[in-house]
Image (cartoon, rainbow, N blue to C red):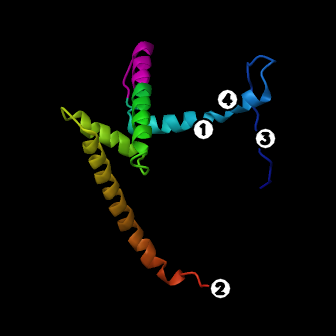
């Protein structure tokens, strides 16, 4: 097996006057787009379309993008009060609030806190076996 260096390159149709700094900025947005696709597929039904025409697919993708924008803006607005809020929790909160006729900000925070408590309990529960297994591997204090 040989050890080769990985070569990366980009092809662009940008104007010659475009600066390298601007090109690097555009290239850096690739990771954000991949995050959006991952979130949209996992949380918002991006991969759940059953369409036969371009127009139907385009409508579905537009609605998914709009839903992602709405969830992201909601998450960003609520992050000030609940810094641990994830996109998944924001989706769950929105799903549970859409079933109600009215939702106050306190209701939304209570829903988020409920899911955060559940996440902590699940995290602690999954961590217990690992801690038991590695209990004897505690690091020694050197000082």
Above or below — where is 2 with respect to 142?
A: above
Label 3: which secondary element = loop
Residue occupying the point 80% across, 53% down? 3
In the rendered structure, the answer to whether residue 130 lies left or right of residue 111 reads right
Above or below — where is 60 with respect to 45?
A: above
- Residue at label 1? 31
In the rendering, at what x and y percent does residue 114 appear?
28, 53
Residue 96 quadrant? top left
Residue occupying the point 73% across, 32% down? 24
- Residue at label 4? 26
Report the mark closest to the observer, 1 or 2: 2
In the rendering, at what x and y percent does residue 70 appear?
40, 30
- Residue at label 3? 7
Name the main secondary structure of what is drawn in magenta. helix
- Residue at label 2? 142
**Counting other residues with Cα less than 10 Å from the Cα at mark 3, is it few (<14), some (14-19), or many (20 or more)?**
few
The mark that comes first in sequence, 3 or 1, is 3
């Amino acid at each position: 097996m040989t050890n080769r260096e990985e070569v990366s390159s980009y092809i662009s149709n940008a104007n010659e006057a475009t600066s390298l700094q601007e090109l690097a900025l555009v290239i850096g947005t690739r990771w954000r787009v991949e995050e959006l696709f991952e979130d949209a597929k996992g949380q918002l039904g991006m991969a759940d379309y059953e369409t036969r025409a371009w127009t139907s697919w385009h409508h579905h993708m537009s609605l998914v993008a709009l839903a992602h924008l709405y969830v992201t803006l909601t998450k960003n607005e609520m992050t000030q009060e609940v810094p641990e809020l994830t996109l998944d929790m924001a989706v769950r909160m929105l799903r549970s609030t859409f079933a109600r006729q009215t939702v106050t900000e306190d209701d939304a925070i209570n829903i988020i806190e409920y899911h955060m408590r559940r996440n902590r309990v699940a995290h602690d529960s999954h961590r217990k076996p690992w801690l038991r297994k590695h209990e004897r591997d505690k690091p020694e204090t050197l000082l």
